Amino acid sequence: MKKNILLFSIFLLGIAFLSSSCKKDDDPETKTCNLIKNDTLDSDMDLVFKVEKTGDANCTQISYTIAGAVQTLTNPTLPWTISTTGEAGEAIELTADATTTNGSISINISGSSGNSSLSLSESCSQYND
């Protein structure tokens, strides 16, 4: 009889252990994303800077630079796009700071001129079950 009680107790402890190990985490992991892309233009170009998101990504700041002139937006609404021009030799840069639990954020700089093109992109994602 004592052996049966002992086996039954071990069985119950095993069930309790298994059920607690399968419990989902109540606090899903949040990822911090700091995206940056930059280059120096080879020729005069028409440029498009873009920041896009999916899911619950929250962008806290976007900064873009053309020829040393920095523009910063705080808590921008996404998707965000700006079209501009740049001259040969100018440095360009796009950055985005964001967090996400179940989503993604991406930045992209594209440019074109008669004889060349430019495409820079970076993304960050996090998905919890």
Image (tube, rainbow, N blue to C red):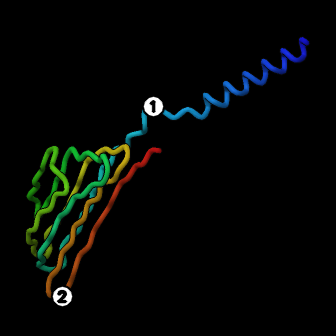
- Which residue extends farthest bottom? 115
Tell me which residue sits at (14%, 44%) in the image. Answer: 74
- Res 124 → quadrant: bottom left
Residue 94 screen position, x and y as percent: 21, 59
Quadrant where the N terminus is found in the figure? top right
Callout 2 environment at 10 Å: few (<14), some (14 to 19), or many (20+)?
few
- 24 relative to 81, above or below: above
Determine the secondary structure under disc 2.
loop
Labels in figure, total: 2
Q: Is 15 situated above or below 98?
A: above
Element under disc 1: loop
Image disc number at residue 26: 1
Q: Position of residue 14 (x, y in %)?
A: 73, 26
Q: Which residue is mark 2?
A: 115
Front residue of 123/79: it is 79
Disc 1 versus disc 2: nearer the observer:
1
